[in-house]
Image (cartoon, rainbow, N blue to C red):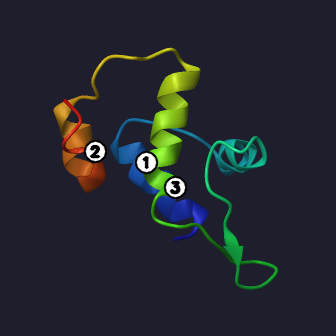
C-alpha cells in the first residue's frame, strides 16, 4: 500500500496527516517500515493504517474509544470496546 492510499484512508477517519508526518512516524519507529519496490515506489504493510491511527491518537492524548464510523472503516479496530 503506497503512502497516498494510507493518507486517503486516514482522511476518511478524519485524520489529516501529510506524507512527511507518515515518514516521521516511520523514522521514530511508531509504524512498520515499508518495503521499497524501486527508488520512487514504497509499499507499506496493511497494518500501517492501524498503527498510524493509534499513533495519531496517542500523540494527541486521545484515550477514549474511537467513533463508530472509524471502527467501520478498519476491520481490525471493530472489536475495541
In this picture, residue 53 sits left or right of residue 39: left
Q: Position of residue 52 (x, y in %)?
A: 52, 44
Q: Earlier in the sequence, mark 2 or mark 1?
A: 1
Q: CA distance from mark 3 to mark 1?
A: 5 Å
Q: Position of residue 77 (x, y in %)?
A: 28, 44
In this picture, residue 73 sits left or right of residue 15: left
Q: How many other residues sit within 10 Å of disc 1, few (<14), some (14-19) or many (≥20)?
A: some
In the foreground, 54 or 22: 54
Furthest residue toward bottom: 38
Residue 18 falls in which quadrant of the image? top right
Q: Residue shown at 55%/34% (left/top)?
A: 55
Q: CA distance from mark 3 to mark 2?
A: 13 Å
In this picture, residue 71 sits left or right of residue 29: left
Q: Quadrant of the C terminus?
A: top left
Q: Which residue is mark 2?
A: 77
Q: Position of residue 33 (x, y in %)?
A: 68, 61
Q: Which mark is residue 48?
A: 3
Q: Residue shown at 27%/23% (left/top)?
A: 65
In this picture, residue 79 sits left or right of residue 10: left
Q: Are marks 3 and 1 in contact (CB under 8 Å)?
A: yes
Q: Which residue is mark 1?
A: 50
Q: Are marks 2 and 1 in contact (CB under 8 Å)?
A: yes
Determine whether the residue tagged by mark 2 lies in a helix, strand or loop: helix
Image vertical order of residue 12 relative to residue 61, above or below: below
Q: Earlier in the sequence, mark 3 or mark 2?
A: 3
Q: Position of residue 8 (x, y in %)?
A: 45, 55
Q: How many other residues sit within 10 Å of disc 2, few (<14), some (14-19) or many (≥20)?
A: some
Q: Residue shown at 34%/46% (left/top)?
A: 12
Q: Which mark is residue 75?
A: none
Amino acid at each position: 500500500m503506497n503512502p497516498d492510499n494510507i493518507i486517503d484512508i486516514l482522511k476518511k477517519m478524519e485524520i489529516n496527516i501529510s506524507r512527511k508526518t507518515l515518514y516521521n512516524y516511520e523514522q521514530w519507529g511508531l509504524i512498520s517500515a515499508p518495503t521499497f519496490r524501486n527508488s520512487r515506489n514504497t509499499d507499506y504493510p496493511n497494518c500501517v493504517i492501524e498503527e498510524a491511527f493509534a499513533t495519531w491518537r496517542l500523540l494527541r492524548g486521545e484515550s477514549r474509544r474511537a467513533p463508530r464510523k472509524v471502527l467501520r472503516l478498519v476491520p481490525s479496530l471493530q472489536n475495541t470496546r
